[in-house]
Structure formats: structure tokens, C-alpha cells
Amino acid sequence: MTAQRYAKNAKIQMVHQMMSQKLCQKLMSEPFRFEDRDRSSGRRSHSGSHRGLSRVPPG
């Protein structure tokens, strides 16, 4: 049972890693769009986007 649980945790971690990598690729492929949005909507949205990014684990 513990081995099964470990395998499940490993699978979840792998999925999270794939999701974070896709997110990074998306951010890298269209950085200008995010910059334009921050510049146009001002300072408040910029701090909000930073708060959203801090939730994503590094890597």
C-alpha cells in the first residue's frame, strides 16, 4: 500500500512538473503580450500578476 501511494505521489509530481514546464514555455513564447497587458492596465494588475506567479513552484 505504501509503495502504491508513493507511485501515486510520483505521478502527481510528474504531472505538476509537466504543467509548470508548459506554463514556462507559454510565458517564454509570448512575453510581449504579458508586458503589454501589464503596461496598459497599470500598477495594480502588475502586483496581482506577481502574486499569481509566486503560487507556482520554481523550476
Image: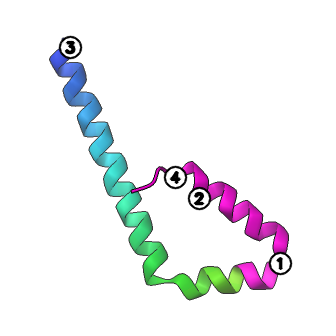
Residue at 37 percent of width and 47 percent of height: 16
30 over 5 or under it: above or below:
below
Instruction: Using the image, tell me which numbered label, if any, was put on residue 42.
Output: 1
Residue 50, quarter of the rendered image: bottom right
| Magenta stretch contains residue 54 | yes
Q: Disc 1 on helix, strand or loop?
A: loop
Which amino acid lies under the numbered mark 1 shown in the image of this protein? Gly
Residue at 43 percent of width and 82 percent of height: 29
Residue at 39 percent of width and 73 percent of height: 25
Which of the marked residues, 3 or 1, is nearer the chain's N terminus? 3
Query: How many neighbours does mark 4 have within 10 angstroms: few (below 14), some (14-19), or many (20 or more)?
Result: few
C-alpha gap between disc 2 and disc 1? 17 Å
Which amino acid lies under the numbered mark 4 shown in the image of this protein? Val
Which amino acid lies under the numbered mark 3 shown in the image of this protein? Thr
Left or right: where 30 falls relative to 59: right
Span shown in magenta: 38-59
Residue linked to disc 4: 56
C-alpha gap between disc 4 and disc 3? 28 Å
Q: Position of residue 43 (x, y in %)?
A: 83, 73
Residue linked to disc 2: 53
Which of the marked residues, 4 or 1, is nearer the chain's N terminus? 1
